[in-house]
Every structure is written in C-alpha cells, then in structure tokens.
C-alpha cells in the first residue's frame, strides 16, 4: 500500500521550489507595479506628494533588508551550532561531572556534595528516574567526595537505572537548605537542537555544556 506524507509534498516535474531571494524580487516587482498604477491613477487636482512615494519606498526597503538579515542570522546560527557540536564530539565516551541524573549499574558512584555554610547535619537523598525518593544517607559535612554503594531504604541494592541526588542541610535540627550533588555520567551523544548544542548522557539525561563542571576519561573514578 502506498503511503503519502501529510506534511511533505514533492514538486511536480519542472516546478522549482521558490527561494527567499526569488520571493523578495517578485514582491519588489509587484510593489513597483502597484506604485506605478498609483501614480497613473492619482487625482491630478490633488497629486500624491513625492515625500509619500519616498516613504513607501523606504518602508519596503526596510522590510526587504530585515528579511535578508533574518535569513543571514539563521544561517550563522546553524553554522555556529554545527561548529560547537564538532568541538563537543570529542566528549563522546568521556565522563562529565553534572547535577543531572546519572546511570547506576551496581558499581559504587563517587558523589560530590556541597554542604551549605553553617550546616550541622547533612543527609544525602537518592531519587529515581520517576522522581521518587528511594534512599536517605547521613553523610559527613565535607566538600570531599563521597562514595555511594547504592542501597535503598531497606538496605537492598538499587536496581540499574538513572538516579539524581540532592543534599539536605540541617541547622539546629531544622532543614535549612537543599543543595545540588554532582556525579560523573558517561556522554553518549552530542546533539544540535533549537536551543543550541547539548549532550546526552548514558541513561538519557540531557545537559547543556555550560552545566558541566569537569570532563574526565572513563574509569578514573
């Protein structure tokens, strides 16, 4: 059975696809015809002032230049995006330090908490891909890396999957602040989207290059 796309139509033989420049030229020719017709049919007792013609020409010229500028900016944006993606391609296969969810496959993860100033007690919270809290672990108040063995609230091993982490900071027994916890995740892909270049981590999380704190060779942690 033949299937025809509802969004894409092939031009008939001999029919060229109009380009932006062709459309502008065509519109300008139409504008000149209309302007000439206007001059030929003006009231001889109350002719249109030359300043009015100049204003119309200036308006059309401004619109034409804006269209060309927008086209140029779109082209430059695409080129810059491709250039950035080419530079980031070397990161594929590397491990990026991020606050985004990272893949846990049974091997202990090294985490990098950032306790708030004045914290009395700190609790590491583990959240699964569905946003559900699956474990809580009191940890020392330190900026040093913390090794997460990967156990749930009942002490059993966490199943393979993507997990995010946060640190609850307590002062005088009250929750004062929640801070981000970083971990290393493997970079699987670099993409160029509408918002620019971003990286896809193992497990599916996406990260902007500006949100990556460090990059390292795999297996160093």
Image: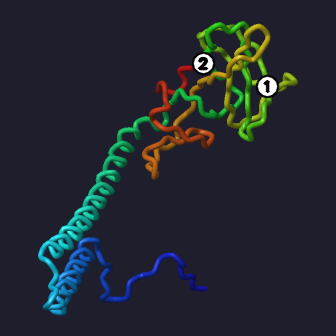
On screen, residue 113 versus residue 23, left or right, reads right
Q: Position of residue 203 (x, y in %)?
A: 63, 40
Which residue sits at x=87%, y=24%?
154
Characterize the local packing of mark 2: few (<14), some (14-19) or many (20 or more) Cα atoms within 10 angstroms: many
Check the image and name the residue furthest to the front: 45
Q: Is residue 216 visible?
A: no
Please tell me in which quadrant of the rendered image residue 202 appears: top right
Q: Position of residue 197 (x, y in %)?
A: 43, 44
Q: Is residue 55 visible?
A: yes
On screen, residue 220 versus residue 128, left or right, reads left
Pointer 2 with pointer 1, Cβ within 8 A: no
Which residue in the protein does label 1 denote?
A: 135
Q: How is the image coloured?
A: rainbow
Which residue in the protein does label 2 denote?
A: 112
Q: Secondary structure at mark 1?
A: strand
Q: Position of residue 204 (x, y in %)?
A: 61, 43
Check the image and name the residue furthest to the right: 154
Q: Is residue 83 above or below residue 98?
A: below
Q: Secondary structure at mark 2?
A: strand
From the image, which quarter does the C terminus lie in? top right
Q: Position of residue 26 (x, y in %)?
A: 23, 80
Disc marking residue 18: none
Which residue sits at x=18%, y=89%?
42
């Amino acid at each position: 059975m033949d299937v025809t796309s509802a969004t894409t139509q092939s031009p008939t033989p001999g029919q060229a696809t109009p380009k932006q420049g062709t459309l502008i030229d065509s519109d300008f020719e139409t504008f000149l015809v209309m302007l000439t017709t206007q001059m030929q049919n003006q009231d001889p007792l109350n002719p249109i002032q030359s300043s009015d013609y100049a204003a119309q020409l200036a308006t059309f010229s401004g619109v034409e230049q804006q269209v060309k500028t927008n086209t140029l900016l779109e082209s430059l944006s695409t080129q810059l995006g491709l250039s950035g993606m080419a530079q980031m391609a070397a990161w594929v296969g590397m491990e990026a330090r991020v606050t985004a969810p990272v893949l846990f496959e049974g091997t202990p993860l090294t985490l990098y908490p950032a306790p708030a100033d004045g914290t009395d007690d700190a609790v590491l919270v583990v959240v699964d891909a569905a946003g559900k809290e699956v474990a809580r672990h009191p940890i020392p108040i330190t900026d040093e890396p913390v090794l997460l063995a990967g156990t749930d609230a009942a002490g059993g091993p966490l199943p393979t999957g993507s997990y995010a982490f946060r640190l609850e900071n307590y002062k005088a027994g009250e929750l004062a602040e929640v801070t981000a916890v970083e971990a290393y995740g493997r970079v699987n892909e670099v993409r160029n989207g509408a918002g620019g270049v971003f990286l896809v981590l193992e497990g599916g999380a996406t990260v902007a290059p500006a949100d990556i704190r460090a990059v390292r060779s795999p297996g160093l942690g």
